[in-house]
Amino acid sequence: MSFLTFLREIGKFARVSTMLAKDSVRTRMESEQGISFTEFTYQLLQGYDFVHLCRNHGVRVQIGGSDQWGNITAGTDLVRRLLGGEAREPPACYGLTFPLLVDSEGRKFGKSVGGAVWLSAEKLSPYKFYQYLFQVTDADVIKLLKMLTFLPLEDIEALQAAMGAPGYVPNAAQRRLAEEVTRFVHGDEGLAQAIKATEALKPGAATQLDAATLETVAGDAPSATLPRASVEGTTLADILVAVKLQPSKSAARKLVKGGGVYLNNAKVSEELYTVKPVDLIEGRLLLLAAGKKNKMLVRVSD
């Protein structure tokens, strides 16, 4: 359909005052960025989609997020005007919207805010999916438990009450949310993989490390590659400097001596500890930690 045809056959039924009254349009007009002509007229294009689907395919209901309400009602209005008339009743069409998933600050969970939370394990590993949910704020966790899980409401209310009580274990509600939703999306196997990887990254954790688990978390921890000759028989302090976890050998040795360095989750206190072939996980990986948060996955190349 040409632009002129669209204006002649559909545009004449659109009322600018109605279009301006849409919440989505008014909000954008009041923002610093304003609204482009393309965005403003989009409601007509989506509205005409509804007309076409109703007329050609018998579609009577359009479903979307609550931010789509204006576009959906633009469609029901066009259906009445284009498919009704003096001699016939227009088809009865309906719109159904669901509340958008937003955080405590009103930002929606989407591809444009902080990266996409993909359901496909190929696009986002079960571990990263689990971590995303585990890291939601206390302000958001109860709402998400109600919206994204099938836990009984009384169980969620008990968790909410526990959050404000003495002795509450931090992030217990987040852990429950992450477990329930990860199991629902990725199954028991995916949840087990996510929990194992989460535990593996904790310094001092007893979880047995393996290459598959470390590769799972590779995207969440910085990584470096060193030749085998620069790893085997080299002091741990030298390796910490080589991968830039420490600024100097003296600082690295001091941190090792103070018990702040972990090799494959095991604390190393020997100041001049030398990395041995047996320390390499499956002969090719090391997990280093300088303190609790600074981690580095080291790949060893031949």
Image (cartoon, rainbow, N blue to C red):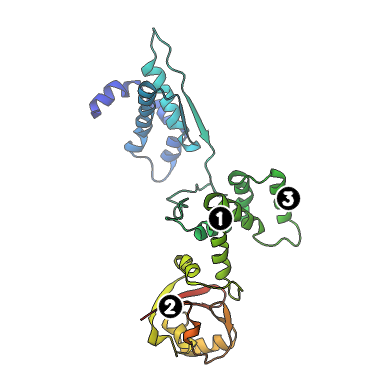
Q: Earlier in the sequence, mark 2 or mark 3?
A: 3
Mark 1, residue position: 133
Residue 274 picture location, percent across and down: 49, 90
Please tell me whether mark 3 sits on a helix, a strand or a loop.
helix
**For the residues marked 2 and 1, what is the alpha-carbon distance in whole angstroms?**
31 Å
Q: Is residue 18 visible?
A: no
**Label 2 environment density (alpha carbons within 10 Å; few <14, some 14–19, many ≥20):** some
Disc 2 designates what residue?
284
User: Residue 136 location in percent, x, y?
Assistant: 57, 55
Q: Residue at x 55, y 91 (%)?
A: 271
Q: Helix, strand, or loop for circle 2?
A: loop
Q: Residues within 10 Å of mark 3 (few under 14, many from 20)?
A: few
Query: Which residue is denoted by mark 3 in the rendering?
Result: 158
In which image quadrant can residue 6 be found?
top left
Structural crowding at the residue carrying mark 1, measured as other residues with C-alpha within 10 Å and reported as few (<14), some (14–19) or many (≥20): many
Q: Earlier in the sequence, mark 1 or mark 3?
A: 1
Q: Is residue 139 above or below residue 232?
A: above
Helix, strand or loop at mark 1: helix
- Identify the residue at horizontal 76%, vertical 60% (top origin): 166
